[in-house]
Image: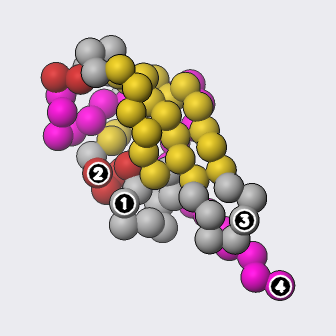
Amino acid sequence: MFREIRKLYLSVGEAVVHLRHPEWGIGKVVEEMNSTLPGGLSMVRVDFKHAGQRTFDNNMESLWCCYHAGVRRV
């Protein structure tokens, strides 16, 4: 049986900033969504002070992970 292990970066309640968009201000992770299917997505929704809500990939194994996009914990 195939079992994928995801390396999640962010959790609900954490404060973050986006390195490429400092004008967005500090954001807070408000939702975490994880697929139960093998190979499925892991996403987080971040509410930024000046940009509203944005959704990012939350799997560190993915090239599109929010960490690689510039999202950092405060």
Q: Position of residue 54 (x, y in %)?
A: 39, 33
Residue beneath label 1, please?
64
- Marks 2/3: CA distance? 24 Å
Magenta-colored span: 1-22
Across and down, in percent, residue 33 comes to: 62, 43
* Image position of 52 (left or right of 62): left
Q: Is residue 25 visible?
A: yes
Quick check: 23 left or right of 66? left
Q: What percent of the width, then of the height, locates residue 34? A: 65, 50
Q: How many marks?
A: 4
Note whether 31 is above or below 1 in the view shown: above
Q: Which mark is residue 1?
A: 4
Q: Earlier in the sequence, mark 1 or mark 2?
A: 1
The C terminus - image quarter: top left
Secondary structure under the numbered disc 3 in the rendered image: loop
Q: Residue at x 30, y 30 (%)?
A: 17
> From the viewer's perspective, is 68 left or right of 19?
right
Please state which of residues 16 and 52 is positioned toward the viewer in this rendering. Answer: 52
- Does residue 5 show up magenta in the picture? yes
Q: What kind of element bears circle 4?
A: loop
Secondary structure state at the residue bearing disc 2: helix
Type of amino acid at the residue the image marks with label 2: Ala
Q: Which residue is mark 2?
A: 69
Which residue was labeled with disc 3?
A: 37
Q: Residues within 10 Å of mark 4 (few under 14, many from 20)?
A: few
Q: Nearer the viewer, mark 1 or mark 3?
A: 3
Of the two numbered discs 1 and 3 on the same chain, state the one appearing first in sequence. 3
The residues bearing labels 1 and 4 have C-alpha atoms spaced at a distance of 26 Å
Mark positioned earlier in the residue sequence (1 or 4): 4
Q: Amino acid at mark 3?
A: Leu
Say what amino acid the circle numbered 4 marks: Met
